[in-house]
Image (cartoon, grey):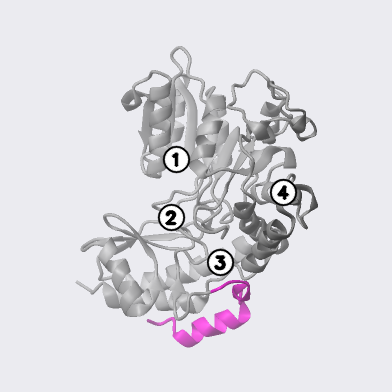
């Protein structure tokens, strides 16, 4: 390899990131932050402080804790909104990703007449596919004809031009989980809405990865998880966005519960909810405080560092990793399938293995070289250098390990 280890270390000295804020597994080059982010050092002490309030105060912690539990979710709202480019009234942290997608589709998937179809990408994450198929069945429709799977952005644009009158909902992943491609969210949103459809986004691989401007782009709704790039921990609480133009629309159906009503009237115990004209109206249940804590800790970190700075370092890291992979792939059954253009990808570079098993490759990378990547069967290995904590030396190790694992042919 012409890009040397010394060069990688020099780059790290000049562009160190924020590695000191995280617990890094010892001896490991970690590239699985697109699957599970690493633990911030601040998470444990801040979570313990919340737990101590429970031990000290019992039920009185709802109002008297250092971070009172009754309005706790509001501590996350403005930071979550800034992360995704939303107004505070448009963003909320709640539930899990697929639960949020279902709650949002209750409001925004309204099949009627000949407009019933749901567009998703052919390589959508399976949970999204299951969710939209089950929504179609819930409405008495055949998911095999209602759910239209398209191969990429160009097919989405073409389908909307030719058959837009059939489409009720466009629901795509902002960054494709398999290939790492960043879709043109504003352009697809405009095209879908111009065709008369509602446009929603699964931002599981986009939130905390790429800058987002959901309000300005006019996105109808979106949801994201917090355990990947947002480092909220396994199964961390997710987020939801609803554009302000929908917030006061009382005709939208919604599922409601204890937390759907105005906070000021919650303890009046009235039999009919009084939902606020914010996305909080889509909440259902009392939020789990000790699950919210790690997400709050992470959002504070993102708020302090800023997505623009993280995106700039992400592009430097992925650019360097691609240079290294360009040296490794010739002569080997390897292909980087993530688009090369910086504006078309996030932190993840996906490598297709032309012979052999992706799972076996990742096992060997881990156990023989200390490089943690992940496999998406049957043939894709995903490397995600996360700008918060990944290093150029990690990238150098990964390319060197891949070269040693997949032999030339």
Q: Position of residue 258 (x, y in %)?
A: 65, 32
Q: Dot 2 corresponds to which residue?
A: 339
Q: Residue at x 43, y 14 (%)?
A: 114
In primary-sequence order, the first of circles 2 and 4 is: 4
The question of residue 9 being in magenta is answered with yes
Q: Nearer the viewer, residue 307 or 60?
A: 60
Q: Nearer the viewer, residue 146 or 351?
A: 146
Q: Residue at x 46, y 18 (%)?
A: 115
Q: Which label sits on residue 39?
A: 3
Magenta-drawn segment? 1-23
Mark 3 touches mark 1? (CB < 8 Å) = no
State whether residue 42 is above or below residue 269: below
Q: Position of residue 313 (x, y in %)?
A: 59, 67
What is the crowding at mark 4: few (fewer than 14 residues within 10 Å), some, or many (at least 20)? few
Mark 2 touches mark 4? (CB < 8 Å) = no
Q: Dot 4 corresponds to which residue?
A: 59
Local SS, label 2: loop
Quarter of image, res 315: bottom right
Q: Nearer the viewer, residue 374 or 56?
A: 56
Q: Dot 1 corresponds to which residue?
A: 153
Q: Position of residue 148 (x, y in %)?
A: 37, 30
The question of residue 324 being in magenta is answered with no
Asked whether residue 346 appears in the rendered view, the answer is yes
Quarter of image, res 398: bottom left
Local SS, label 1: helix
What is the crowding at mark 2: few (fewer than 14 residues within 10 Å), some, or many (at least 20)? some
């Amino acid at each position: 390899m012409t890009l040397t280890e010394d060069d990688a270390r020099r780059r790290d000295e000049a562009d160190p990131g924020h590695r000191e804020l995280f617990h890094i597994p010892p001896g490991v080059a970690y590239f699985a932050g697109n699957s599970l982010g690493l633990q911030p050092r601040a998470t444990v002490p801040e979570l313990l402080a919340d737990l101590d309030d429970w031990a000290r105060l019992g039920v009185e912690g709802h109002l008297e804790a250092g971070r009172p539990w009754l309005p706790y979710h509001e501590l996350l709202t403005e930071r979550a909104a800034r992360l995704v480019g939303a107004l505070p009234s448009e963003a909320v942290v709640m539930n899990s990703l697929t639960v949020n997608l279902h709650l949002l589709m209750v409001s925004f998937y309204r099949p009627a007449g000949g407009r019933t179809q749901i567009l998703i990408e052919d390589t959508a994450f399976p949970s999204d596919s299951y969710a939209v198929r089950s929504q179609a069945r819930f409405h008495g429709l055949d998911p095999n004809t209602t759910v239209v799977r398209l191969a990429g952005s160009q097919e989405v644009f073409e389908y909307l031009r030719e058959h837009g009158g059939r489409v009720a909902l466009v629901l795509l992943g902002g960054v494709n989980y398999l290939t790492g491609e960043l879709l043109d969210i504003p352009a697809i949103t405009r095209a879908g809405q111009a065709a008369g459809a509602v446009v929603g986004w699964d931002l599981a691989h986009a939130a905390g990865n790429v800058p987002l401007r959901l309000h300005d782009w006019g996105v109808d709704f979106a949801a994201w998880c917090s355990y990947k790039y947002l480092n909220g921990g396994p199964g961390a609480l997710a987020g939801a966005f609803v554009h302000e133009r929908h917030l006061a629309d009382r005709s939208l159906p919604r599922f409601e519960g204890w937390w759907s009503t105005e906070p000021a009237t919650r303890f009046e115990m009235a039999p009919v909810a009084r939902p606020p004209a914010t996305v909080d109206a889509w909440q259902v249940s009392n939020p789990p405080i000790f699950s919210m804590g790690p997400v709050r800790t992470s959002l504070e970190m993102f708020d302090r560092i800023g997505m623009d700075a993280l995106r700039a370092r992400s592009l430097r890291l992925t650019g360097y990793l691609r240079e290294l992979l360009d040296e490794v792939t010739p002569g080997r059954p390897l292909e980087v399938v993530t688009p090369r253009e910086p504006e078309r990808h996030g932190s993840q570079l996906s490598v297709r293995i032309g012979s052999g098993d992706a799972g076996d490759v990742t096992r060997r990378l881990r156990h023989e070289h200390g490089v943690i990547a992940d496999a998406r069967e049957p043939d894709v290995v995903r490397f995600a250098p996360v700008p918060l904590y990944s290093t150029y030396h990690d990238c150098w190790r990964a390319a060197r390990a891949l070269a040693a694992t997949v032999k030339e042919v």
